[in-house]
C-alpha cells in the first residue's frame, strides 16, 4: 500500500501547478484530517489548506488551550460545575502570524501557541478532551467555523462527530516507532532532558485514552481514506492529499 502511495505522490508532484490553477474554480468543501498523535496531521492539514487557499483549523490546539487554562486556574476537571463555570470564561481564537505564516492559538487574547505544546499540557490534554462539556464547547465553535466551508480541520473526531458529512475525510496513521521519533525531535528542541521512553509512554497513554473515551472516541469514519505516512516524505503525503481533494472538489 505504501509503495502505491509513493508512486501516486511522485505522479502528483508533476501536476501540482495544474491543480493549483483549477482549485479556484472548484466548489468549496470541508476536509477533515483525523488520526493518532504525532502522525503529522497538523502539518499535512496546514499545508493542504495553504495549497487550496483554505482556512486551517487546528482543533487539537483548542483542546490544548482549554487544558492550559484549567491548569493555570487550578480547575478541577473531574467536577462538572467547575468545568462548566470555567468554560464560560474561555475565549479561543486563531490569529494569523505574519512572521511564521501560520495561525497561532490565542487564549483570552494571549498568544499561547508555544505554551500549549509543553509536556505538562500533553500529559493532560487527552483527559480534558474526553470531558463531555469540554467537547460540546469545542465542537460548537468548530462547526461555526465550517459554516462557509473552504476549511481543513484536523483532530480525532472531526470526520465522525464535528463534520460527519464532510466531502473528504482523511485518516492518518503511522508506525508507533516512527511517531515516537518524530515527537521526540519536536520535544527535544524545547526540553533537552526529555527521553524516548517518556515520549513513547505519553503517546501510548494518549492513544489509549483517545480510542477508549466514552465521548467521541478516536476512530476512522466509515467513508474516510487511510493515509499511512510511515515511509512517506511530507511532500509525498501532501501530494496524495491534494489529489484526493481535487477529486472531491470537482
Image (cartoon, grey):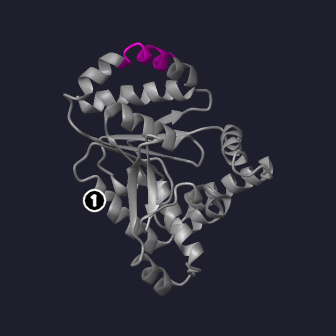
Front in this rendered view, residue 229 or 42: 42
Q: Residue beneath label 1, please?
A: 144
**Residue 57 position in % (x across, y down):** 39, 50
Q: Label 1's element?
A: helix
Kindly indicate the quadrant of the structure image that contains residue 135.
bottom left
Q: Residue at x 23, y 39 (%)?
A: 28
Q: Magenta part mainly helix, strand or loop?
A: helix
Farthest front residue? 99
Q: Quarter of the image for the N terminus: give it.
A: top right
**Residue 73 position in % (x across, y down):** 56, 78
- Residue range highlighted in magenta: 7-16
**Residue 186 position in % (x across, y down):** 66, 44
**Residue 62 position in % (x across, y down):** 46, 60
Q: Is 12 contained in the magenta span? A: yes
Front in this rendered view, residue 190 or 160: 190
Instruction: Check disc 1: other Cα within 10 Å, few if <14, some if 14-19, many if 20+.
Output: few
Q: Is 216 contained in the magenta span? A: no
Q: Is residue 168 above or below residue 140?
A: above
Q: Residue at x 46, y 56 (%)?
A: 105
Amino acid at each position: 500500500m505504501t509503495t502505491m502511495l509513493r508512486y501516486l505522490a511522485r505522479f502528483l508532484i508533476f501536476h501540482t501547478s495544474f491543480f493549483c490553477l483549477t482549485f479556484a474554480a472548484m466548489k468549496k468543501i470541508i476536509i477533515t484530517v483525523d488520526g493518532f498523535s504525532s502522525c503529522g496531521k497538523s502539518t499535512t492539514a496546514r499545508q493542504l489548506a495553504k495549497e487550496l487557499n483554505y482556512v486551517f483549523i487546528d482543533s487539537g490546539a483548542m483542546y490544548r488551550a482549554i487544558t492550559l487554562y484549567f491548569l493555570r486556574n487550578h480547575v478541577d476537571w473531574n467536577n462538572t460545575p467547575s468545568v462548566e463555570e470555567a468554560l464560560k470564561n474561555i475565549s479561543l481564537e486563531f490569529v494569523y502570524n505574519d512572521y511564521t505564516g501560520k495561525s497561532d492559538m490565542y487564549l483570552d487574547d494571549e498568544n499561547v501557541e508555544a505554551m500549549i505544546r509543553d509536556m505538562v499540557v500533553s500529559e493532560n490534554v487527552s483527559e480534558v478532551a474526553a470531558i463531555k462539556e469540554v467537547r460540546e464547547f469545542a465542537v460548537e465553535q468548530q462547526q461555526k467555523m465550517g459554516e462557509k466551508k473552504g476549511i481543513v480541520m484536523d483532530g480525532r473526531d472531526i470526520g465522525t462527530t464535528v463534520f460527519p458529512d464532510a466531502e473528504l475525510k482523511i485518516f492518518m496513521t503511522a508506525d508507533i516507532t516512527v511517531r515516537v521519533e518524530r515527537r521526540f525531535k519536536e520535544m527535544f528542541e524545547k526540553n533537552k532532558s526529555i527521553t524516548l521512553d517518556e515520549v513513547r509512554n505519553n503517546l501510548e497513554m494518549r492513544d489509549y485514552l483517545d480510542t477508549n473515551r466514552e465521548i467521541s472516541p478516536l476512530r476512522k469514519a466509515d467513508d474516510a481514506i487511510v493515509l499511512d505516512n510511515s515511509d512517506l516524505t511530507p511532500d509525498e503525503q501532501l501530494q496524495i492529499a491534494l489529489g484526493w481533494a481535487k477529486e472531491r472538489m470537482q
